[in-house]
Image (cartoon, grey):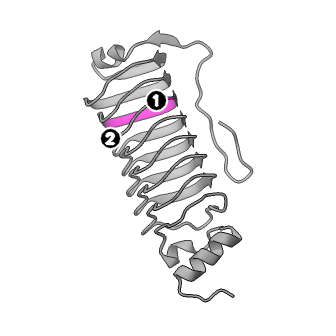
Amino acid sequence: MSTSKKTKFSPPQLTAELTEAGWADVLDDEDHELVGASVAGASYEYGNIEKCILSKVRLRGCSFVSTAFERMDMTDVVLENCDLSNAVLEKAIIHRVHFKDCKLTGLNLSKIIAGSVLFERCVMNLCDFVEASLKQVRFQDCSLQNANFYGAKFKEIELLNSDLNEADFNDTSLKGIDISTCTFERIDIPAYALAGCTVSPEQAIGFAKLLGLIVK
């Protein structure tokens, strides 16, 4: 996970050698806990797991489509080319996690507590971040079309080269957030939420028109 001059990110802390494991190891464990392991190609779709703890884990090419994770706790985890479309991670605790090239369409991340998280080249259309608490989280080269950030709390958030078309930022302050490298045709941001937000000149003209200003 790269760092930024503005935001200090702590990358996932994985050990040099991870034990090869399967998702069955998680399901068979009484506490649904997996530590210091690498899982590749696992598939657990349309399932439900009550309490799941992943620590120092790498997941590659795994599919968890439409699976509900209750009380998920992820610390020092890397997910590469994984599919969590329409999965539920509501109220999860996610710390030092890197999502890379993942399909997260429709993923429910409402009310999560996330810190030092990187979403890189992820498809996150229709993702739900309602009332999420995000600190030191970076979205880089992601598609966030129709994502819902209603009532989310941002602290040291970066939105870089991402598609924010039709994203909803109602009841969410963008103070200190730079969206100048992002693209959108339409975006739902109330005027009060734009205070302190950094935008490009082209975006500024668009927002001015939305506010009813005449730009010459």
> Looking at this rendering, what residue extends furthest in the right direction?
5
Quarter the C terminus occupies: bottom right
Q: Is residue 108 left or right of residue 74?
A: left
Describe the element under mark 1 as helix, strand or loop: loop
Q: Nearer the viewer, residue 118 or 100?
A: 100
Q: Amino acid at mark 1?
A: Cys
Residue at image location 71% in from the left, 47% down from the top: 4
* Magenta extent: 69-81
Residue at which label 2 appears:
88
Quarter of the view holding residue 93: top left
In x, y percent, where is residue 73?
40, 34
In x, y percent, where is residue 10?
62, 38
Quarter of the view holding residue 179: bottom right
Q: Nearer the viewer, residue 59 or 210?
A: 210
Residue at image location 51% in from the left, 78% down from the top: 191
Q: CA distance from mark 1 to mark 2?
A: 14 Å
Q: Mark on residue 82?
A: 1
* Residue 188 higher or lower than 46, as above or below: below
Q: Nearer the viewer, residue 213 or 48?
A: 213
* Dot placed on the residue nearer the N-terminal end, 1 or 2: 1
Describe the element under mark 2 as helix, strand or loop: loop
In x, y percent, where is residue 95?
50, 38
